[in-house]
Image (cartoon, helix red, strand yellow):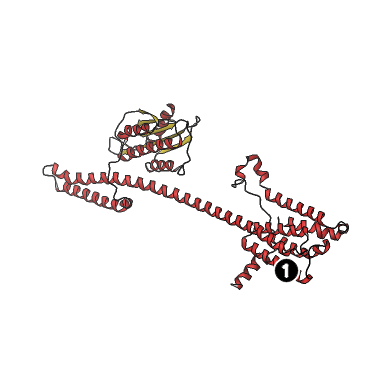
Amino acid sequence: MAAGALDGLRQDLFRNAFAYRPLERMRTDGPLLRQLPERMRERAAWTPHALVGAAALLTAFVGLVSADSFALRFAVDFILIVLLPVISVLMTLVRPVGAFWISMALTPFSAVASGGYWPWAPSTFLSHLMVLVVVAARTRPRTAAWMWGLTVVFGTALENFGGWHPSSTTSTFAVASAFALLVVAVVQIRRDAQREVTVQRTVTAVERDRRTLLEERTTIARELHDVVAHHMSVVAIQAEAAPYRVENPPPELEQAFVTIRENAVAALTELRRVLGVVRAEDYQAPDAPQPTLAQLDGLLANVREAGLETEKTVTGAVRELPQGVELSAYRIIQEALSNTLRHAPGATAKVEIGYVLGGLGLRVVNGPPTGPVKPSPGAGHGITGMRERVAMLNGDMTAAATEEGGYEIAAFIPVQLICDTGEPNGTHTTHESHKAQAELGEKA
């Protein structure tokens, strides 16, 4: 333990004691300066330097007032009583540990020059106290403890060396410096604790965002699993029943249907093995049919009951779309309206759905809020989930504020066309995407 203590002493006060370590400005985005007007923050960032300068001026004033007027007639006495104590205080701005050693070495000479007090004259009493406080604030509590201990030992040794003096200042300085350093240590510990809490909050926020994104992807994967599993099951059942619908089917046809069924069952098994893990955490949740755009009126009725005036507009020939497209469109509209309820209280919303040959266009726009907006720690997660859904279907999506102070979400989900040959045709997707978004935008 003693070896560790000595190593700490060497590291804190002896190793690179006169290294250049300039005092940095305060951060303009810190908790203190954020409370000031923006035009004052740049100047207020130099507050620590101004305080050190004020301490140096106070030291010079105390030295001039307390010293014997006869002593100040000599240049060497003026240097020892006034100038060097001021320099030691200012030195804490660039070489804090070196300032401590210079202040210590100056103590007996200044006391001899001023007379009356031993071992700390009034000017060195104040200057060394200021040096201890500034260095302690710039380093760590362990360094402050070492400085205080060395100061007390040094002052006690000087008293014993010089004999008893009626104006001894060692005990007074020990008490005053201990109190000052204790205050600095408490402030430092509190500041470090606040910094640690801030770091933990940042880490927690990042983890929360990551977890929310993973949960959204899990939800999408779960819904995708349900949709694909349903279609694969239908393929397997139809392949098994198809031979019985034909009288005396040829063996080649029967074998083809058997192969189709076997491949469908194998694909379904692999699908459940790979994607079925998403059900592990909520395996007790009851299965429910996934919503489609046919249930959109019920969703709009719910948000109207919650206080959101909503208008729906449908253009184009309404038709049944693939289940994955309908489900994603429903979820996007649902999340957009939920965001409006959270972030734009009192606003109105418009839901526009456009059926075009190449796919489905969606647009949800709300006006500016008319009531107070409560802070939401999960801001942005819903937008991320919507982008995930649109990207999964190779679609396009934009989300941005409107000029009126509201918010607009526009998306296009492509749907492949089936040509006469039975092959999917996606050549109209890009053109129809721009067409659908343009048509929806004209209605804004």
Q: Is residue 95 visible?
A: no
Q: Is residue 409 visible?
A: yes
Q: Which residue is identified by label 1?
A: 156
Q: From the viewer's perspective, is 366 left or right of 300?
A: right
Label 1: how many Cα within 10 Å (few below 14, some 14–19, many 20+): some
- Number of on-image labels: 1
Question: In the image, is residue 129 above or below residue 213?
Answer: below
**Picture coordinates of residue 72, whole percent (x, y):** 86, 57
Question: In the image, is residue 225 above or below residue 354?
Answer: below
Q: From the viewer's perspective, is 254 left or right of 205?
A: left
- Where disc 1 sits, the SS reads helix
Residue at 69%, 67% in the rendered image: 150
**Residue 325's image quarter?**
top left
**Picture coordinates of residue 164, whole percent (x, y):** 78, 69
Amino acid type at mark 1 = Thr
Quadrant where the C terminus sits is: top left
Q: From the viewer's perspective, is 315 left or right of 11?
A: left
- The residue nearer to you, when weighing 197 against 222, is 197
Residue that lies at the very extreme toward the top in this rendered image:
443
- The residue nearer to you, when weighing 234 against 109, is 109
**Picture coordinates of residue 48, whole percent (x, y):** 68, 50
Quadrant where the N terminus sits is: bottom right
**Picture coordinates of residue 68, whole percent (x, y):** 85, 58
Question: In the image, is residue 438 above or below residue 37?
Answer: above
Q: From the viewer's perspective, is 406 left or right of 429?
A: right
- The residue nearer to you, when weighing 354 against 86, is 86
Residue at 65%, 65% in the rendered image: 146
**Residue 349's image quarter?**
top left
Residue that lies at the very extreme toward the left in this rendered image:
248
